[in-house]
Amino acid sequence: MVEDFILSKRPYWERLSQLTRAAQSNIVTMQANELQELGRLYRQATSDLAQARRDYPGHPVTVYLNDLVAQSYGAIYRERSASVSNIWRYFAVDLPRTFRETLPFFLASLIFFLIPVVVGWVIAARDPNEGVKLMPEMQHIITDMQNNNQWWLSINQDNATSAAFILTNNIAIAFRAFVGGLLVGILTLYVLYFNGLMLGVIAGAAQSIGFADKLWGFVIAHAVVELSIIILAGGAGLQLAWAILHPGLLSRRAALVKAAQRAFKLSGAIVMFLILAGLIEGFISPSALPLWFKIGVAITSGSIMYGYLFLAGRKAPQTVESGDQPLLHIEQLI
């Protein structure tokens, strides 16, 4: 029975995972007995993987063991690259691949964001006062729109300061969405709900008041990147929550560590594109540049962002030649 196989082997797999993480961090600091244990457990895990592939080819334990052995192989045998090479590999390969591996969480975050957008838009478009009841915090913005006050024009008075303020605010939102996953996703879902509802209420009220062309003339340039970052951070937070609620074959702690590793890999994209969104919102969005140019900025920035996330790092993974070791996809590391 696969359950008996898992129960008998699980302590050894978890110990191998622990030693592998230590080796990935700095293998030269490990004790001799730990290195010997790492080698022994690695060889045992390759045998377990071969058995799982033979006896349980469609079971998740086979996928888990494949990842574990691949990770251990990389920690033991790969050469330590220079720091510059590691940084290049992170941005060129690891980050976009991690995004694609965790795409279901990004899509779930997108859904949780879009639902309040639609609800807020429908309600506020019918009656802006009803939108205010949903979000009293938006009263001053709706009042500005009713008075035809384009509040964003004040950004032009000091673009650099405004860009820094916008960046700080966006980082705070992304951080709450990201870390909120540790509260089993409650804070993450609230951040997605609040920001989605805010966008829907403002956009719906602008449509009702006849202010939509002015509002979108300001928002359109930075909206694609900025909203994508909130959703990406929300997806990272949902990963953490899922690991806590559904650890699968791993212990809850081990599942959370694994999810955190992937989530923190995504943090590079969050920071990188938050800076881009802050610069666009601080210097281009409030400017008097024509609408066609701002739309071009939105399309270009969005294409660069998603082209990078979906297409980068797609070269064929390296494999170990058959012989003493089984054939493994070494590049698919956790």
Image: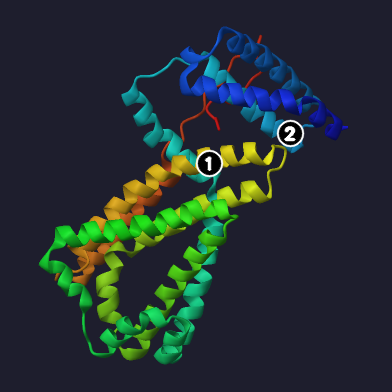
Residue 280 visible, this angle: no
Identify which residue is drawn at 30% across, 68% down: 220
In the image, residue 103 above or below residue 4: below
Q: Position of residue 311 (x, y in %)?
A: 43, 42
Residue type (three-letter) at the residue carrying disc 1:
Ala
Q: Name the residue under label 2.
A: 61
Q: Mark 1 points at which residue?
A: 260
Q: Where is residue 280 in the image (x, y as percent from the top left)?
A: 24, 59
Find the distance from the CA under tag 2 to the CA under tag 1.
21 Å
Is disc 2 placed on a helix, strand or loop? helix
Q: Position of residue 25 (x, y in %)?
A: 47, 23
Q: In which quarter of the image is the C terminus?
A: top right
Question: Counting other residues with Cα less than 10 Å from the Cα at mark 2, is it few (<14), some (14-19), or many (20 or more)?
Answer: many
Q: Which of marks 2 and 1 is in front?
A: 1
Identify which residue is drawn at 72% across, 16% down: 44
Left or right: 151, with 332 as reference point: left
Which color scheme does this rendered protein use?
rainbow
Q: Earlier in the sequence, mark 2 or mark 1?
A: 2
Residue 93 image-quadrant placement? top left
List the single residue furthest toward the left. Answer: 157
Residue type (three-letter) at the residue carrying disc 2:
Val
Q: State the count of labels.
A: 2
Q: Are marks 2 and 1 in contact (CB under 8 Å)?
A: no
Is disc 1 placed on a helix, strand or loop? helix
Q: Where is residue 208 in the image (x, y as percent from the top left)?
A: 37, 89
Identify which residue is drawn at 48% across, 64% down: 192
**Label placed on residue 89:** none
Residue 129 visible, this angle: yes
Q: Between residues 78 and 241, which one lies in front from this camera angle?
A: 241
